[in-house]
Image: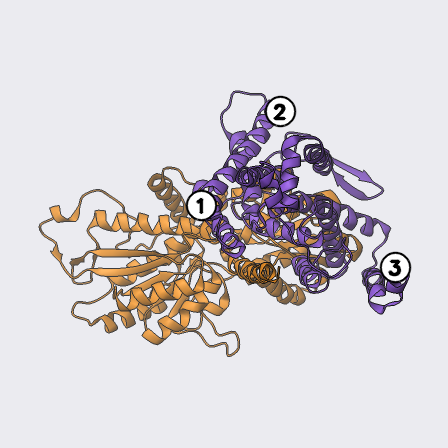
Chain colours: A purple, B orange
C-alpha cells in the first residue's frame, strides 16, 4: 500500500471499522457483565467452529480453483463423512472400539471421496462445456439429492459418534480458570493442522499437486503442458470431498450428526471461502477462523440465536465491499482458472 | 468475470431460499398414546375375523378418514410414527370390517393417507384434495403447528371437522379474540401445561431466578412465551433468555450468558438433538444448576444423545413414557399399555413415541364419531354431525395424551395434569411425581 493510498479515506475504512467493531463488542459485553473468562470462552468456541469452516472452505477453494465453479454440494460431503463414519462405527465389526473408530474415520473419508469422484463424473463431467452457472446449479441439485438420499438411508434421527479421546459419548473436559475446553477441540485443531501441512506438501512438492496448481493458474497453459484438466477436475472433487468428510467426522462428536447437518456447515464454509477470496487456501483458513470468532463474539454479546444472521451479514458485506476477499489488495475480483 | 459473479449472487439467493425452506419450525408435540373409549365400537379391537365372513351384518356406505402427516421433511420424526399409527388403525378397522352405526349397519372405513412434507403449502393442497376429490367425512392432519395453522382456514371454509396432531393453542383458538375455531380440534398437550409444571417444580425447590434457553423454532418460541406467562404468575423471574439452532455445535455464548446472569436453574425449550447438545454444554459450564426441560424431550433419543449429561434432568412429560411406573388406578394406564402393545406389534418393535399417541387419540375420535352417524345423511350433514359429536361426546375420555373433556370453549379438553413429571435416572426416564420432590 503506497503512501498516497493511505491518504485516501478508503484505505482507513478497513482498520477503522475493525476498531469500531471491537469497541461495540466490548461495549455490549460490558452491559452483559462479561469478564475475561467469557470473552476467552467465546473466542475459543469460535476458533473451534472456525476450524471446521476452514476445512470446508478449503474444499470450496480447491474446486473453484481448478474448475471455476462453486461446489454447493460441499456441505453434503461434510454430512456424508460424519454419517458414513457413524454407520461404520455402529456396525457389528468385530473390533476393539478404538480400532473400530479408526476404521470408521478412514471409511468415512474414503467413502465420501469416492462419492465426490462419482459426483464429478456423473454430473459435472458430462456438463463440463456448459457455463459455470449451469454447473453451479448442478451442484445445488446434487446437494439436494444427496441430502434426500441421506434422509432415506439414515432417517431424520440424530446419531452419535463417540468422542475420540474417551470413545464415549461424554468427552474429557479441561477447565482452565473457568474456561471449558473439550478434548475433541484439540482433535479438531490437530487434525486441521495436519491437513494443512499435508496439503501444503501436496501442492508444493508433488507433481500432481503442482499440476493442480497449474490448472488453477492457467487452464490452457496447463493443457498445453500435457496436464489433463479433466483428470484434475476429478482430483479436485476428490480432494474437496475428503476435506469435507474430515471436517464432518472431527466435528461429529461435538454435535449429533443428522442428514441435514451439511446445509448450514456448507454455507458457513462458503462464507469463509468468500472472506478468504475464494482462490487461496490460506485465505480460506483465515476466513474460517475469522468467521468463527466473529460470529461467536457478536452473538455472545447480543443474542446467541442470531449467530447465523451475523455470518450472512458478513458474507453480504464482504461481497459488497471486498469481493476479492480480505487478504488481497485492489478492488478487482480475481479471475480464477 | 461479471458473469461469474452474477452467477454467484443468484446462487446466494438460491442458497438463502434453500436455507429458509430447510429450516422450518418443526413443532414437536409431546404426547403419549392410548386408546379407548368404552362405548365406542373402538378401533382398538384389532382382532381377526374379516367382516365378510359375517353374513348377518348389513354393509353400508364406506366412510373415509383423510389423514396427512409430515412423513418426510424436518418433521418426519413426528410424522412417521403418526403415519404408522394411522396405518395401524386402518388395519384394525379392516380386520373388523369397519364401524357399526347406531342402526347396526356395518360401514367399511377407508383411511386415505398423504404426506404434508412438513410444508404448509403441501399440507393445504393435500387437505384440499381430501375435501374436494376424496370427499372424506373427517380430517386428521398436521404434525407441525405451522402446517396445522395453514389447514385451519381451509377446513373452516369447507366446513369439515379437523383434528390436528400439533400443539399450538392457536390451532383451536384465535389468540386475539379468544374465540374457538369451530371446526378445529387437537390432541397434544400444550406448552402452557409444561410451563405450569416447571413453575411448580421450580417453586418447590426454592428457585426464584431462572435462565431460559430455547431453540429458534416455532416450538421453542412457544415454550418461552408460555414460560413467561406461567412463571410470571408463580412469581419466578426469567433473568436471562437466549435461543440456539438445532444444528449448533457451540453454546459458548449462551453459557457465558447463563454464567453471568445469576440464575439458580435453567429451563430449556427444545427437542433432540438440540436439547441434548445444550444439556451437555450446561453440564460442562454450570454443573450445579438444575436443568428442567419441556415435553419436547420426552423420548429415549434425548437421553441417548446427551449421554451421562442427561442424568438428573427433570421434565414434564406425557404418561406414555413411564407407563409401567404409573399407579394402577391411573385411568390412562390400560389405554397406554394397549397402545404400546399394538404399536410394537404392528411396526415390529419401532420405538414408541408420544407423537404416534397424538395420532391415536385423533384417529380414535374420528372413528368414534363415524360410528355415531345415522343412515341417510348427506356428506355435508355427516361432516357437521361428526363435529358436533366430538364437541359434545368426548368427555372423561382417557386417551394417550390425557383424560380429555372437550367443550365448545375448549377443543382440546386437557389441563396441565395431562402431563406428569419425570426425571432421568440410570439412562432412562422414571416417574417423579410431586410427592417425591
Residue A98, label in figure: 2
Quick check: A219 left or right of B52? right
Q: Same chain, marks 1 and 3?
A: yes
Residue identified by numbered label 3: A2
Q: Nearer the viewer, residue B125 or B103?
A: B125
Question: Residue placed at 65% from the left, 48% from the top?
Answer: B278
Mark 2–mark 3 contact, CB under 8 Å?
Answer: no
Direction bottom: furthest residue: B177
| Quarter occupied by the N terminus of chain A | bottom right
Instruction: Relative to B36, say whether B377 is above or below.
Output: below
Quick check: A163 left or right of B259? left
Chain ID, mark 1? A
Residue A273, x across and y down, in percent: 67, 50
Q: Secondary structure at mark 1?
A: helix
Disc 1 to disc 2, C-alpha distance: 42 Å
Instruction: Relative to A289, say whether B67 is above or below.
Output: below
Disc 2 to disc 3, C-alpha distance: 56 Å
Instruction: Relative to B397, say whether B410 is above or below.
Output: below
Does residue B421 show up? no
Mark 2 or 3 closer to N-term? 3
Chain ID, mark 2? A
Which picture quadrant has residue B48? Answer: top left
Residue identified by numbered label 1: A126
Amino acid at each position: 500500500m503506497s503512501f498516497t493510498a493511505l491518504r485516501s479515506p478508503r484505505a482507513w475504512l478497513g482498520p477503522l471499522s475493525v476498531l469500531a467493531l471491537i469497541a461495540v463488542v466490548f461495549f455490549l459485553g460490558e452491559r452483559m457483565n462479561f469478564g475475561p473468562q467469557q470473552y476467552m470462552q467465546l473466542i475459543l468456541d469460535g476458533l473451534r467452529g472456525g476450524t471446521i469452516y476452514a476445512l470446508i472452505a478449503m474444499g470450496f477453494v480447491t474446486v473453484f480453483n481448478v474448475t471455476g465453479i462453486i461446489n454447493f454440494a460441499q456441505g453434503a460431503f461434510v454430512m456424508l463423512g460424519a454419517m458414513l463414519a457413524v454407520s461404520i462405527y455402529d456396525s457389528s465389526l468385530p473390533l476393539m472400539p478404538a480400532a473400530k473408530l479408526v476404521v470408521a474415520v478412514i471409511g468415512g473419508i474414503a467413502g465420501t471421496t469416492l462419492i465426490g469422484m462419482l459426483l464429478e463424473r456423473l454430473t459435472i463431467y458430462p456438463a463440463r462445456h456448459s457455463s459455470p452457472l449451469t454447473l453451479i446449479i448442478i451442484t445445488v441439485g446434487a446437494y439436494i439429492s444427496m441430502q434426500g438420499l441421506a434422509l432415506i438411508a439414515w432417517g431424520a434421527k440424530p446419531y452419535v459418534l463417540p468422542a475420540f479421546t474417551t470413545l464415549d459419548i461424554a468427552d474429557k473436559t479441561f477447565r482452565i480458570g473457568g474456561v471449558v475446553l473439550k478434548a475433541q477441540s484439540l482433535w479438531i485443531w490437530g487434525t486441521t493442522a495436519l491437513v494443512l501441512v499435508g496439503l501444503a506438501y501436496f501442492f508444493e512438492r508433488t507433481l500432481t499437486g503442482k499440476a493442480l496448481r497449474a490448472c488453477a493458474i492457467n487452464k490452457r497453459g496447463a493443457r498445453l503442458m500435457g496436464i489433463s484438466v479433466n483428470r484434475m477436475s476429478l482430483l479436485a472433487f476428490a480432494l474437496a470431498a475428503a476435506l469435507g468428510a474430515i471436517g464432518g467426522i472431527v466435528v461429529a462428536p461435538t454435535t449429533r450428526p443428522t442428514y441435514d447437518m451439511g446445509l448450514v456447515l456448507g454455507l458457513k464454509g462458503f462464507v469463509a471461502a468468500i472472506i478468504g477470496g475464494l482462490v487461496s487456501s490460506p485465505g480460506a483458513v483465515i476466513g474460517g477462523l475469522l468467521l468463527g470468532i466473529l460470529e461467536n463474539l457478536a452473538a455472545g454479546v447480543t443474542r446467541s440465536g442470531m449467530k447465523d444472521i451475523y455470518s450472512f451479514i458478513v458474507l453480504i458485506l464482504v461481497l459488497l465491499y471486498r469481493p476479492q476477499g480480505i487478504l488481497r489488495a485492489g478492488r478487482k475480483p480475481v479471475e480464477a482458472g | 468475470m461479471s458473469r461469474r459473479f452474477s452467477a454467484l449472487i443468484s446462487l446466494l439467493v438460491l442458497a438463502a431460499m434453500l436455507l429458509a425452506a430447510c429450516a422450518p419450525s418443526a413443532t414437536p408435540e409431546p404426547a403419549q398414546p392410548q386408546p379407548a373409549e368404552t362405548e365406542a365400537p373402538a378401533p382398538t379391537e384389532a382382532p381377526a375375523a374379516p367382516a365378510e365372513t359375517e353374513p348377518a351384518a348389513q354393509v353400508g356406505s364406506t366412510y373415509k378418514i383423510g389423514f396427512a402427516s409430515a412423513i418426510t421433511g424436518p418433521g418426519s420424526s413426528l410424522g412417521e410414527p403418526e403415519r404408522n399409527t394411522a396405518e395401524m388403525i386402518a388395519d384394525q378397522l379392516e380386520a373388523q370390517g369397519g364401524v357399526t352405526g347406531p342402526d347396526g349397519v356395518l360401514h367399511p372405513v377407508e383411511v386415505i393417507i398423504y404426506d404434508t412434507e412438513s410444508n404448509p403449502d403441501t399440507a393445504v393442497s393435500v387437505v384440499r384434495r381430501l375435501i374436494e376429490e376424496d370427499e372424506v367425512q373427517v380430517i386428521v392432519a398436521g404434525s407441525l403447528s405451522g402446517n396445522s395453522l395453514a389447514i385451519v382456514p381451509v377446513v373452516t371454509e369447507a366446513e369439515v371437522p379437523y383434528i390436528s396432531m400439533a400443539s399450538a393453542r392457536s390451532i383451536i383458538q384465535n389468540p386475539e379474540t379468544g374465540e374457538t375455531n369451530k371446526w378445529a380440534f387437537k390432541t397434544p398437550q400444550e406448552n402452557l401445561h409444561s410451563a405450569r409444571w416447571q413453575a411448580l417444580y421450580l417453586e418447590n425447590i426454592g428457585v426464584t431466578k431462572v435462565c431460559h434457553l430455547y431453540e429458534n423454532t416455532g416450538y421453542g418460541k412457544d415454550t418461552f412465551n408460555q414460560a413467561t406467562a406461567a412463571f410470571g404468575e408463580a412469581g419466578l423471574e426469567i433473568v436471562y433468555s437466549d435461543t440456539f439452532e438445532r444444528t449448533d455445535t457451540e453454546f459458548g455464548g449462551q453459557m457465558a450468558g447463563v454464567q453471568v446472569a445469576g440464575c439458580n436453574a435453567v429451563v430449556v425449550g427444545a427437542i433432540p438433538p438440540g436439547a441434548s447438545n445444550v444439556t451437555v454444554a450446561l453440564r460442562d459450564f454450570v454443573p450445579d444448576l438444575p436443568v428442567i426441560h419441556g415435553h419436547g424431550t420426552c423420548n429415549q433419543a434425548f437421553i441417548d444423545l446427551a449421554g451421562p449429561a442427561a442424568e438428573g434432568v427433570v421434565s414434564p412429560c406425557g404418561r406414555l413414557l413411564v407407563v409401567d411406573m404409573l399407579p394402577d388406578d391411573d385411568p390412562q394406564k390400560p389405554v397406554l399399555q394397549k397402545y404400546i402393545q399394538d404399536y410394537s406389534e404392528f411396526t415390529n418393535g419401532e420405538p414408541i413415541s408420544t407423537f404416534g399417541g397424538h395420532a391415536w387419540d385423533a384417529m380414535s375420535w374420528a372413528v368414534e364419531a363415524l360410528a355415531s352417524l345415522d343412515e341417510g345423511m348427506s356428506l355435508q350433514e355427516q361432516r357437521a354431525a361428526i363435529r358436533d359429536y366430538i364437541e359434545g361426546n368426548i368427555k372423561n375420555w382417557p386417551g394417550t395424551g390425557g383424560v380429555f373433556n372437550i367443550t365448545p370453549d375448549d377443543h382440546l379438553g386437557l389441563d396441565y395434569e395431562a402431563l406428569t413429571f419425570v426425571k432421568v435416572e440410570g439412562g432412562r426416564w422414571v416417574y417423579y411425581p410431586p410427592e417425591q420432590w
